[in-house]
Image (cartoon, helix red, strand yellow):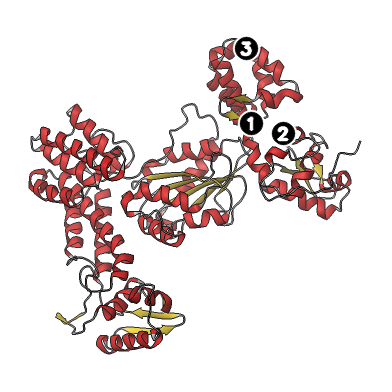
């Protein structure tokens, strides 16, 4: 299929013709023994204008194929379509993918000679434009991903040649490739590297500026990090040096010489400079994410849960940076929550991830979700990537973003357990202990600001309840405002009535961070939230909540579990009957009480979710 679709037996081409017949054969082969529905075959054959005799014509094409291919190749009718098994036959596409994968792995091992040979063998399987003698509908649907796979394999082969010092031999080839693919920044970077090492620095500089103009005119964007890094290395005089090992480039630190090899996505946010504590959790994440030969065939999906403000994102990003060397194909990050706290649509997240994984021009903006998911899974398949999906709201949002091969690892953060990632690798965060809390406060405020006020620092730590967000806010306020002494801030935080108002600085705000959790609650749960907060700081069982709410114990427990699922309530021990007890984090309890008797200010009411008429108020 890597060229005109054809069948060969004993070295001779089987005689059959017609775009429709070639299309049916190619569609069945692409499916890899999976069922291809009649509807899909129809669309690949005739687009959106099928004839009235669709079923009869499909039957005819399949019958002709069976006769041409003989008994060694089986085409079964499996409603709602057909499936093909090629038996002992070979498929050029499968051979190409296997050789390309082995070549990529050899490149990872820095076995450049072997990598180059394998990748050249893979590219030799190509014989022209794929599906050249099939219908345009099949070509439009399937050819782009194959052409992308060929271009990436070509880039890897060139990376191996550059690593072996063959820059002069491949300069002419690269010049033609840049003309053929003017928007592929990696190929342009590789040609700049080859030119520079051949003593043609002026040509390399001109090539960069030409590429910047092309990108601006065609896509309206600036050069990406890889092309910019190559240009910086060129100006600094480091690009003409022998390339660093490819494994080091992929490990995440190539600023200067990255133009010579394959550069992979690195979209993680910056690491937290003063990250404190969580050593046990970091160790759990490291062991869960690290490749393990014993479980190489199982997906690695890890979930970090906990209430808002506990530092789930900071922990996930810190762990991802520490694991970079385990993921030589790159690291991806996506925030699944919009700035207003609402969940992002999976389609928008997929577009963001796809643009980081490959050329933006190959990602159609008008594609439906199924097409985006397929393209995303093709681009992540077999790649040793770490994908961080932050602030997941539910399984429906998360499922389209999960790769379908075991090589990529996925690290998810969310307020509660998610069925698609829950299990042995779930890390539930708790508030920081007093020692780590004090260390985080000192890191944010500056040790000198707290040195003379140990009592005030201890008071601040107590009032923040071990919540990293609150500690960072207070520490930042102390650092940024000389007049805001620890003693003064500790006194202001001591008043529960004003504590939440004090836990605010710039974009950081404890009250605002808790709002998305509250907005997701059902109206009835939102209504009882401040009423339950009036039970006080100690843990309480469902029976006490039932009495306060004037509901049955079973109904009260249902509401309590809903609050626990939203990470607005914790399960803490059991009562004398063995029933679970529930506990508010001190700041969550203040947040609930601040909502007032209505439990829902009008300004915060989600559209289409009317409030119930009855209001529950605390009993005196």
- Measuring from the top left, give residue 611's x and y in whole percent: 76, 47
151 relative to 341, above or below: below
Q: Residues within 10 Å of mark 3 (few under 14, many from 20)?
A: some
| Residue topped by disc 1 | 510
- Is there a contact, CB below 8 Å, between mark 2 and mark 1? yes
* Left or right position of 516 against 72: right
| Residue topped by disc 2 | 591
- Measuring from the top left, give residue 136's x and y in whole percent: 28, 70
Q: Residues within 10 Å of mark 2 (few under 14, many from 20)?
A: many
Please identify, in this view, whether the residue under mark 3 or under mark 2 is nearer the observer: 2
- Is there a contact, CB below 8 Å, between mark 3 and mark 2? no
Distance of label 3 from label 1 (alpha carbons): 21 Å
Secondary structure at badge 2 equals helix
Looking at the rendering, in which quadrant would you find the C terminus?
A: top right
| Residue topped by disc 3 | 485
Q: Quadrant of residue 40?
A: bottom left
- Measuring from the top left, give residue 446's x and y in whole percent: 53, 17
Whether residue 382 is visible, yes or no, is no
Please identify, in this view, whether the residue under mark 3 or under mark 1 is nearer the observer: 1
Residue that sits furthest to the right in the current view: 620
* Left or right position of 535 against 602: right
* Left or right position of 23 against 48: left
Distance of label 2 from label 1 (alpha carbons): 9 Å
Q: Quadrant of residue 102?
A: bottom left
């Amino acid at each position: 299929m890597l060229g005109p679709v054809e069948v060969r037996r004993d070295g001779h081409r089987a005689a059959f013709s017609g775009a429709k017949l070639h299309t049916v054969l190619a569609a069945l082969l692409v499916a890899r023994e999976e069922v291809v529905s009649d509807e899909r075959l129809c669309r690949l054959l005739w687009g959106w204008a099928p004839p009235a005799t669709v079923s009869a014509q499909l039957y005819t094409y399949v019958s002709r194929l069976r006769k041409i291919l003989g008994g060694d190749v089986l085409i079964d009718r499996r409603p709602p379509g057909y499936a093909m098994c090629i038996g002992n036959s070979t498929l050029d596409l499968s051979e190409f993918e296997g050789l390309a994968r082995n070549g990529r792995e050899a490149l990872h091992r820095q076995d450049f000679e072997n990598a180059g040979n394998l990748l050249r063998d893979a590219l030799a399987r190509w014989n022209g434009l794929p599906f050249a003698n099939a219908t345009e509908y099949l070509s439009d649907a399937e050819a782009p991903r194959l052409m992308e796979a060929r271009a990436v394999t070509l880039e890897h082969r060139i990376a191996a040649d550059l690593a072996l010092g063959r820059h002069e031999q491949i300069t002419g080839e690269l010049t033609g490739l840049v003309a053929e693919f003017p928007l592929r920044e990696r190929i342009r970077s590789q040609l700049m590297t080859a030119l520079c090492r051949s003593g043609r620095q002026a040509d390399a500089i001109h090539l960069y500026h030409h590429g910047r103009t092309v990108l601006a005119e065609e896509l309206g964007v600036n050069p990406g990090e890889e092309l910019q890094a190559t240009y910086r290395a060129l100006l600094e005089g480091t690009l003409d040096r022998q390339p660093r090992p490819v494994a080091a480039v992929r490990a995440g630190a190539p600023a200067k010489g990255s133009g010579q090899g394959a550069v992979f996505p690195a979209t993680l946010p910056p690491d937290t400079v003063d990250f404190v504590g969580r050593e046990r959790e970091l160790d759990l994440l490291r062991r869960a994410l690290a490749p393990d030969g014993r479980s190489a065939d199982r997906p690695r999906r890890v979930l970090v849960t906990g209430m808002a403000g506990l530092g789930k994102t900071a922990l996930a990003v810190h762990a991802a940076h520490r694991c970079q060397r385990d993921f030589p194909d790159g690291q991806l990050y996506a925030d699944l929550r919009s700035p207003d706290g609402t969940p992002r649509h999976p389609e928008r997240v997929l577009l963001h991830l796809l643009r980081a994984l490959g050329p933006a021009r190959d990602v159609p903006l008008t594609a439906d979700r199924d097409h985006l998911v397929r393209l995303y899974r093709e681009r992540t398949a077999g790649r040793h990537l770490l994908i961080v999906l932050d602030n997941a709201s539910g399984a429906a949002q998360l499922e389209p973003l999960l790769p379908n091969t075991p090589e990529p690892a996925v690290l998810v953060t969310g307020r509660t357990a998610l069925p698609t990632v829950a299990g042995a690798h779930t890390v539930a965060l708790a508030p920081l202990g007093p020692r780590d809390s004090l260390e985080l406060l000192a890191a944010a405020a500056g040790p000198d600001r707290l040195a003379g006020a140990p009592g005030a620092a201890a008071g601040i730590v107590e009032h923040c309840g071990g919540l990293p967000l609150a500690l960072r806010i207070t520490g930042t306020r102390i650092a940024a405002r000389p007049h805001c002494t620890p003693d003064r801030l500790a006194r202001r935080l001591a008043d529960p009535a004003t504590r939440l108002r004090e836990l605010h600085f710039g974009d950081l705000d404890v009250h605002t961070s808790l709002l998305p959790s509250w907005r997701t609650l059902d109206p009835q749960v939102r209504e009882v939230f401040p009423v339950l907060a009036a039970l006080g700081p100690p843990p309480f069982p469902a029976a006490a909540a039932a009495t306060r709410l004037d509901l049955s114990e079973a109904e009260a427990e249902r509401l309590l579990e809903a609050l626990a699922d939203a990470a607005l309530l914790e399960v803490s021990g059991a009562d004398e009957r063995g029933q679970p007890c529930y506990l508010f984090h001190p700041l969550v309890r203040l947040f609930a009480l601040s909502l007032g008797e209505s439990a829902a200010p009008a300004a915060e009411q989600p559209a289409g979710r009317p409030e119930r008429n009855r209001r529950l108020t605390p009993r005196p």
